Image (tube, rainbow, N blue to C red):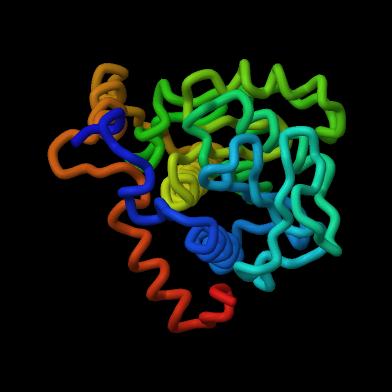
């Protein structure tokens, strides 16, 4: 079964109810923190609420990702209005970025934005992400770039964010960070995780080049082939996160199951 044939709710991380979705989303926040991809109380992950057009869940502004649980999320609409009463506020930049993608892409069930160090460093390189490793191949030819416009506080930037993302599932925010779009929470997380691995390896390789080593890149034809294999799920390759997500939940349940509360 290929990408276009999949019902997102049939995948691991494809929650069928809001209650299930809240648990999946809380797990994603905890995983971002566990793998060191968070930035204190900043950054944001949002998910579209099932059967509630125009509504999505996002984190309360002021909580660490390691504190997030299923009951704490704020439900807002595409205009930033709270749909349900909450004592918490929402990061303005988070609203601008996430409302843009949720409104502009029908497949954007989960939107994940981070300022992780390696990804942000690569966002500042003119060449962006290079096909240095197999981790990077998933994004070869499938990556958007959005030039920095300052802190994302103006709703006018939303149109350009959607334009620059295009049909892709990853957007590099120049001098800022990265953003992934997933049909499930699991997919959005695994894309961010894989991009960070690719970015770290690239930076390590470039550091070696600066010390006198020579960088070996695959032939462009081979890079395109590998990208196609990942993105068309050739062989036994499945959509990002499909196999990994149950293992991630087991990890969190061993460490601290309070994300489910």
Question: 35 or 179, which is in the foreground?
Answer: 179
Would you say 145 lies left or right of 89 here?
Answer: left
Residue 189 image offset from top left, x and y in percent: 49, 51
Is residue 240 visible from the viewing direction of this image?
yes
Q: Which quarter of the rendering shows the N terminus?
A: top left
Residue for point 76% across, 26% down: 148
Residue for point 61% across, 65% down: 33
Residue for point 31% across, 49% down: 10
Question: 12 or 142, which is in the foreground?
Answer: 12
Would you say 79 lies left or right of 167 here?
Answer: right
Q: Which quarter of the rendering shows the C terminus?
A: bottom right
Residue 220 image offset from top left, x and y in percent: 31, 18
> Residue pushed farthest left?
235
How many dots with numbers? 0
Question: 195 or 2, which is in the foreground?
Answer: 2
* Among the 4 quarters of the image, the one containing residue 111: top right
Residue for point 63% across, 70% down: 69
Q: In the displayed structure, would residue 21 be above or below residue 173?
A: below
Residue 156 image offset from top left, x and y in percent: 81, 20
């Amino acid at each position: 079964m290929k990408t276009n044939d999949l019902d997102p709710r049939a995948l691991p991380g494809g929650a069928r109810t809001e209650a299930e979705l809240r648990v999946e989303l809380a797990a994603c926040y905890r995983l971002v923190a566990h793998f060191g991809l968070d930035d204190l109380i900043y950054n944001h992950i949002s998910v579209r609420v099932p059967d509630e057009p125009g509504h999505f869940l996002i984190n309360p502004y002021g909580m660490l990702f390691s504190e997030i649980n299923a009951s704490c999320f704020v439900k807002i609409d595409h205009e930033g209005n709270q749909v349900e009463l909450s004592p918490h506020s929402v990061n303005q930049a988070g609203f601008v970025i996430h409302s843009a993608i949720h409104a502009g892409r029908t497949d954007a069930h989960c939107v994940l934005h981070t300022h992780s160090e390696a990804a942000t460093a690569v966002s500042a390189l003119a060449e962006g992400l290079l096909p240095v490793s197999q981790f990077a191949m998933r994004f070869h030819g499938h990556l958007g770039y959005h030039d920095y416009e300052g802190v994302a506080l103006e709703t006018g930037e939303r149109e350009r964010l959607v334009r620059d993302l295009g049909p892709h599932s990853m957007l590099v925010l120049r001098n800022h960070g990265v953003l992934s779009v997933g049909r499930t929470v699991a997919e959005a997380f695994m894309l961010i995780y894989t991009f960070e691995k690719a970015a770290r390896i690239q930076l390590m390789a470039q550091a070696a080049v600066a010390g006198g080593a020579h960088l070996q890149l695959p032939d462009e034809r081979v890079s395109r082939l590998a990208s196609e294999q990942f993105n068309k799920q050739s062989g036994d390759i499945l959509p990002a996160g499909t196999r990994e997500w149950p293992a991630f939940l087991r990890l969190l349940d061993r460490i601290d199951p309070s994300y489910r509360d």
